[in-house]
Amino acid sequence: MSEFPPPSMREITSEVAALLRHKAETISVAETAAGGIISAALLSTPGASKFYKGGLTLYTLESRIAFAGWTQDDVQSYKGPTPEVVSDLAARVRKTLGSTYALCESGTAGPSAGSTRNRTPSVIGSCFDFADSI
């Protein structure tokens, strides 16, 4: 059985967790292509309940309608992962869960990603949304 999180993620995950605990701050996560692995890595650290407010795995456009406040118009105008899409998802999850920070990633990957404009494999973008005040 392999270890989780993998060594390549373990150091940064522990560092983020330690900083959040030390500052008594919190984080929420919205994931698309990562499928929950960011949340799982954060939750694997001791004391995660002190800093992890929750997360969403928004793998499909339908899940964004159900859980992220998207409308059918958002789906129709979707052009694939963009900084604006990622920023909006981060802002929504941070506001909804009341966390100090939100981390969101979005991307298109995998063997069946396709070749249409919004399904071409692309680099995953990340965005932090910071609370002005909570």
Image (cartoon, rainbow, N blue to C red):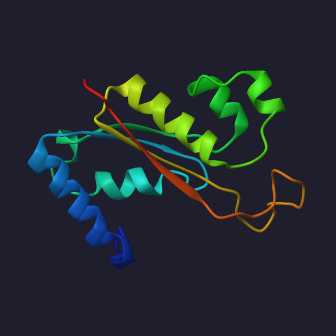
Quadrant (top left/top right/bottom left/bottom right) for the C terminus: top left
Q: Position of residue 8 (x, y in %)?
A: 37, 77
Q: Quadrant of residue 130?
A: top left
Residue lying furthest front in this view?
A: 132
Quadrant (top left/top right/bottom left/bottom right) for the N terminus: bottom left
Identify which residue is drawn at 26% across, 72% down.
11
Seen in the image, is 52 located left or right of residue 89?
Answer: left
Q: Position of residue 69 (x, y in %)?
A: 60, 22
Identify which residue is drawn at 57% across, 26% down.
67
19 relative to 58, above or below: below
Identify which residue is drawn at 86% across, 60% down.
114
Q: Quadrant of residue 42?
A: bottom left
Identify which residue is drawn at 49% across, 28% down.
92
Q: Quadrant of residue 10?
A: bottom left
Q: Position of residue 49 (x, y in %)?
A: 21, 40
Q: Position of residue 83 (x, y in %)?
A: 60, 47
Seen in the image, is 58 located left or right of residue 46?
Answer: right
